[in-house]
Image (cartoon, helix red, strand yellow):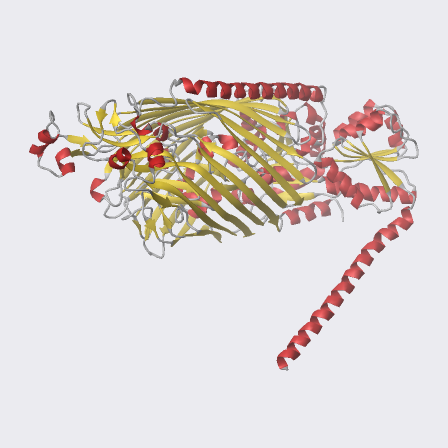
Amino acid sequence: MEVKGVKFGFKALLNSSFGLLLLLVGMWVQADAMVPAAREAATASKSITVVLSGDSGLYQRSLAALKRHLPTTMEVESLTLEQIASGERQLSANDFVVTVGAKAAEQVMATATEARQLSILLPSSTFYDLAKQYPQSAQRLDGGRLSAIFLDQPARRQLNLARLINPNLKAIGTLYDIRSQQLVQQLSEVAGGTDIEFRSRRLLPSDNPIAVLREMYRDIDVFLAVPGKYIFNRSTAKWMLYLSYRNRKPLLGFSEDYVTAGALAAVYSNPEQIAGEAGSWLQECLDSGKPLPPPSHPSIFSVSVNREVASRMGLGSLIAARLESQLKAQEQLP
Amino acid sequence: MKGNRPAGQRRRHNDLAVIPGLTAGLSLAALLIATLVTISAAMASFSARADSGTQSLQEHDWNHTIPKVIFATRQQQPITSAPSSVTIITREMIQAQGAFHLAGILRLVPGFQVFLSNGSTFGVTPHGFSDRDPRRLEVRVNGRSAYLPQLASVAWESLGVLPEDVDYIEVVRGSNVPAYGSNAILGAVNIVTRNPVVAAGSRIDITSGDAQTRIASFSHSAKLTDSELLLRGAYKESHGFDGVDDAAHMGHLVASGVFTPNLSHSLEFEMGLSQGDFGVGDGDHLDEFTNDDRHAFWVNGRWKYFSSDDQHWNFGLSWADYRYENSRPVLLSSLLQVPPAWIPLLVPGHEDEALELETGRRDFAVFNAELEHHLEWQSGQQLVWGLGARGDLLHTDHFVRGDGKVDTWVYYLFANVNKPLNRRWEMNGGFMLEKKNGFDAELSPRLALNYHYRPGQHLRISATRAYRQPALMESDRLWTVRFADGDLVDLVHSSDPDIGSEQVDTLEIGYLGFWGQGRWSLDIKLFQEQVRDAIDGIDTNENSCSVLLTGIEALLRRYCQSFFVDGDYGAPFDKRQRVFTNSGNWETDGLEAELSYKLDDSRSLRLTYAYLESEGSRIKSLEDGLSFGDYEDAVPRHSASLLLTQALGNHWRFNGFAHYVDQVAWRSGTDVDSYTRLDLNLGRTWRWANNEAELTLTLQNVADADYLEFQRNNHFGRRAFISFSLAWP
C-alpha cells in the first residue's frame, strides 16, 4: 500500500505538475500575444517597404531582425533592386522605405522619390557621398524625410575604447586607402580635440605592406584598423595582426570577426542591433508622425575582446562587458 | 599463370594497354580544366565589372570573413563552414601539453594514434590500421607535402620542426582527398610554423632529462628592407628505450622568409636541411637493430598574387631530396646455419660472403608544383580551383624493379565551391582528379551540407569517395638479396603488377556548438568509413603457387608472382615471397568528440574522446592454404584525453595532460595493452625590459606504470625533464 501510495502520490504530482506547466505555457503564450496586440493598436494600418541590396545572409538577417522589432500586423513589403530600377514598383510620397545596404540606398535615392527613407547598414561616408550625388537629398534630409543609421562606429567611441584599453595612450595610428579616407578624416578631427596623437598613412598599391606597418607600429601605442580595399581583403590584414603580436601593441578591429581572427578588441554594431534600432525609430515616427531623426551612428553596440590575445599582451584584466558599459557611460547611453 | 609472368611486363610503364585509359583521363582533365578556366574568366570579368568605379566603402568591407581554417578545402573559411571535422591546435595547447616531439602533439586529436616505433621515431595514424610506417595521412609543413615517396609515409623526426616552432596545426579528421590528394585518404595535417613576421629577436631553448635526452634549439629573426627572415636550428639526442639499441642523434637548420614587394604580391619561402642517425629495428629481434642515417634537404616557395579585390592566385613550388642509408650485412652461412665451407657446394661459383639484409641506401626526391585560383563573391560564395604536378623519384639498389630507379609523376586537378544556399544552409562541393603514370585517372568527390540552425549551433553532413593510388614501394617493389656480383640469393618482396587504388567511402554527421560567449565548445562527429581494396602484403610460397592447392586455385592464380627475376631463380633457399596487392577490406564506425571549456582567463580544460569499432579482413597468407588476418584490434576501441591548463599567478603555470588508449594490435609491432599516461608540467616565467626567461619542469607518465609503445621492449616508464628558454629582442 505504501508503495502504491507513493506511486499514486507521484502520479498525482505528475498530473498536477503537467497541469501547472500547461497553465504557465498558456499564460506565456497569452502574454506574448498581448504585446504585439498593444503595439498593433497604436500602429494599425501602417506599412513599410524594405529594399534589400542583395539576397545574402547579411541582408536577410537584417530583414528578419527588423520584422522581429515591428508589430506583427504591420505590413512589410520586401522589394528587390530590380523592382525599383525597372519602375515595376513606383514609390510614392506616402511610402515609408527602409533601405538595407548601400546599393539599395542609392537605388531609392536615384528614383527622386518623396517617400520617407531610412537607410541602414551602410557606412557614413557612403551615405554622405550619395546625399551629395543626388541633389534632392539635401531637402529630404532637412525635412526629416531621409535619414540613416550607419554601420560604422563614431570616431570618438573608437578613441574612447583605445583609451580604456591603454590609459597611457599617447599615439594611435591607422592605414587607409581611398575608400576609407573619410573615416580616417573623422578620426583625425576627433583626435585633434584630444591629447592623443593621431598618425595615419595612405596605403598605395606599390607599397610594401610590412615595411609600412613596421614603421607605423614603431611610433604608436595602439593600431586602429579601418575597413578598406587594401586593408581587409588582402594579406595585409594578416601582417597587421602578426606585427601587433610581435610589437605587443594592441590592434583594434571593426568587427567581431576581426577579434576572432586575432585583433585584441573591437567595438561594432551587428546587423541585428542596427535593425533593432531602426525598428524603434520606425515605430516612433509612425506612431507620432514626427520627421525622422537626423542620420547617426548606432547607439546600440557591442565590444568584443580576444581573451588569448589579451593574455599574450599582458592585458588579461580586460573584460568586454565592462568596456562596453564604460563606453556607454561615457556617452551617457542607457 | 600470372605468377609466372616476367616482372618487367606490367600494366604500367609504356604498356600500350594503358594508352586508352591515359588518353581518356587526360581528355577528362583537359575538359574540366577548360571548363573551370572559362568559368573563372567569366567570373573574373563579372567581378571586375561589378567592382569598377566603386570607390566608396560598402557594408561588405565590414563583414568579410577573416580566415580561420584553410586546410579543409584550401579555402579560407570559418571552422563552422568546413565540410569535415577540423581540430585546431594552438600554441597555448602545445605549451600546456608539454610534448618534446612534433608528432606527440597529435595525441590531442581525437581518433588519432601516435606511437614511438623506436626510441626517437614516431608514427601517427588516423583510426589505427597501421604498421611502423603509417600511410593514408597527408602532412604538410607550411604548404609543403612532407611525405617520403617510397611508402607515402612521414618521417616526423626529420621534418625540421620542434613543438616550440609551431604557430598552429590544423587537422582534418576524415578523408580530405578532394582537397589535397591521395595521401589524405583518412586525414590531413597542416603544420604552420611561426611566421618570420611574428618572430621577434632571438631565442634559445635547452632541455635535458631522462633517456639521456638533450635538446638545444635557437631561432633568430632579421629584418631587411623588403623582407623578414627567420633562422632556426636544433640538435637532439636520446638513448631511447632501456635495453634497446635505438639511440638517436639529429639536427636541423631552417631558414624562412617573407617578401612583400607591394600590396598585390607576397612570397613566403623556406629552405632547410636535417640530418641524423636513428637506431631502428624490430623489438622482437634486439640483435638485429641497425643505424639508419637520414639526410633531408628541402626548398619551398609560395607566391600569392591578388589580382583584384575578390580574386587571388597561389603558386607553390617545392623540392625535397632525401638520402637514407642503413646496413646489416650477415654471412650467408650464418643465415643458412651451415659451415662456410658448404657455401661453394650449395651455390656453385660463390664463396661465403656477407649479404645486405636491410634496405641499404635509398635516394629519393619529391617535386611538387601547384597553382590555385581563388574567387569570392559578395554573396559569400567562394570557388577555388587549381592544378598541379608531383614527381616521386626513388633510387635504391635492391628494392625496386628494373635498374633500381623509379620515377612517377602525378598530375592533378581540383576544385571546391562553398556556397551559402540561404540564411541557414551552406554547401561545399569539391573533387580531386588524379592521374598517375601507368594508372587510371581517379576522381574523388565530396559533398557536404552545413546547417546553421541557431547562432553558434551548427550541423553538418558530408559524403566523400576517395582513392589512394599506390606509393612507389607498393607498386614497384622488388626486394631482393644478392651477392656482391649481383647474383640473386632470395626474392623477398614484390608488387602485384595489377595493383590498383584503395577506395574509401566516408559518411559523417557532425555537430559543432558554442555556448557561454564561446567559452564552451563541443564538436561531435559520427562517421562510417569503408575501405576497399586496401594495399597490404600476402605471403605466398613457391610450393603452393606451383601446385595450385585445391580450393584456392583462383586466389593463387590471382596473387602468386614469378619466383624468377630477369631469368634468375629467387627461391633457392627460401620459398616464400610477400606480394603487395589490394588484399584488405574493412569498415570503421565511430564517434569522435572534443569538448573545450575556458573557465576563466587562468583556467581551461579540453576533453577528447573517440570510439572506434572496426571489422574486416585481409588475405594474409597463401602459403599453406588460405589464411585471413582480421582487423578487429587494429584500432583502439576507446581513447580519450584531458588537457588542463592553470595559471597560478606570479608568473607560475601548471598544466596536466592525461591520455588513455585502449588495447590495439599494431601490424609489424605487437599487441599493446590499454594504458593511461599522465604528463604534468610546472613553469615559471621572468620578464624584464623586453626579455623573457622561462624554466619548466616536465614529468611524463607520472604514475610510472610502464606501458608499451608499439612493439616489444619499448617500455615507457616515468621520465622527467627540465627546460630553460631565453628570448631577447
Choose top left, top right, bottom left or bottom right for residue B43: top right
Which residue occupies the extreme front position in the image?
B550
Horizontal placement of A88 versus B726: left or right?
right
Quarter of the picture containing the C terminus of chain B is top left
Q: Nearer the viewer, residue B38 or B155?
A: B38
What is the tally of numbered marks visible in this picture? 0
Which x, y percent locates residue B257?
45, 26
Residue at point 31% right, 42% down? B668
Residue B639 in picture, x, y percent from top left = 44, 51
Q: Using residue A253 as the reference point, say whether residue B395 is left or right of it.
A: left
Q: Residue A184: horizontal and vertical position, in percent?
A: 69, 29
Please indicate, yes or no, whether residue B305 appears anywhere in the rendered image. yes
Please name the residue shown 66% across and 32% down the image: B380
Quadrant of image for the N terminus of chain B: top left
Looking at the image, which residue sits at the far bottom? A1
- Relative placement, left or right, of B719 versus A64 is left
Q: Nearer the viewer, residue A138 or B557?
A: B557
Can residue B725 be seen? no
Residue B487 higher or lower than A147, as above or below: above
Residue B641 appears at what percent x and percent y?
A: 45, 51
Relative depth, front residue between B201 and B623: B623
- In the image, residue A322 above or below residue A4: above
**Of the pair A213 and A146, the residue shown nearer to us:** A146
Residue under the image location 91 percent in, 46 percent down: A44
